[in-house]
Image (cartoon, grey):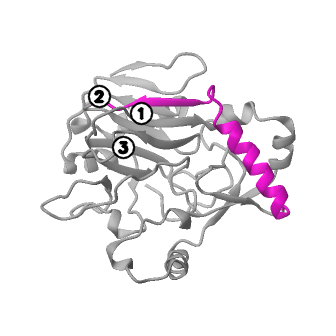
Amino acid sequence: MKVTPPPPGRIGARVDGFDPKTCTREQATELRQLVYRHKLLIFGNIELDDLAYLAMAKNFGKPQIYHQAHYHHPRHPEIFVSSNVPMDGKKVGVASTGRFWHSDYQFFDEPLSTTFVFPKIIPEGRRVTRYVDMVQALRTLPAHLRDALTNATCFHEAVMYYKVQPWDIDRAIAELMAEFRKHSPGAHHPAIITHPVTGEQALYISEGFTMSVDGMPHEQSQTVLREVFLHLNRSDLVQEHEWGKGDLMFWDNRQLNHMAGGGAPGQPSRSYRIGVYDGLPFYVGCKLEDTRL
């Protein structure tokens, strides 16, 4: 493999010569260390069928099975499907996912360590994924916001992004939200986390999932979060990758927020995500339960 580091101050190393079909656990361990260092890895010219994709991911850790079954691949529940294209004449997955700033599974007690995304059908137009380096975001955070968030925890939930399904017809929004919260009640995490491998500190807040700062009066909490969200949208912090055929992306959710974007409306689109638990606590002090290798 040939690894091309990103320019200074940027994220994302390019990895050439990687063959996922012959990936070993030893190679996966090496690549995990690279993603902790560079936060994002970009593999090009990749060809993978579904079984080979899943087999490769298992070398990196324990694949996640998403908590809502309608996102699952029909034969491989570990594959999260974002698609507006039928499969064998049937609707599979959910269209237009992740078009807001977030870190995967932030709203669960054990967030998702790392994420692979492999597009199968790329829509016409400019299809991108945007990223924010949350380590750099913390370093550049204004002092009054850092003071407000030091030793604070935040509440995260995803109920506002529930995708209404055909079986939800004639049900009240309040009923749907209450049912969602039974399975996904939200989670509290430190506003500033420490990476278990690099020791780096990162801001752990996202515009999509972070609802409040615990213990703060509501208006103060919302004011602080609005200011943080404005900071995270600074042009010098946002970086994007334009998807090309054969691209495979791998990133560390501890250090990045991301958001899907671009693509011409209505164009066919399908991508496969596999989230992988790496067997480590998400952050120093985070409880580790059933995500061990």
Which residue is label 3 attached to? 117
Q: Rounded to the nearest whole Å, what is the CA distance between mark 2 and mark 1?
A: 10 Å
Count of all numbered marks drawn on residues in the image: 3
Q: Earlier in the sequence, mark 2 or mark 1?
A: 2
Residue 112 colored in magenta in the image: no
Residue 236 colored in magenta in the image: yes
Nearer to us in this view, 76 or 174: 174
Relative image position of residue 267 (x, y in whole percent): 27, 44
Callout 3 crowding tier (Cα within 10 Å): few <14, some 14–19, many ≥20: some
Q: Is residue 170 above or below residue 28?
A: below
Nearer to us in this view, 270 or 60: 270
Relative image position of residue 74 (x, y in whole percent): 22, 64
Q: Secondary structure at mark 2?
A: loop
Mark 3: amino acid = Val
Mark 2: amino acid = Phe
Q: Is residue 12 above or below residue 293?
A: above
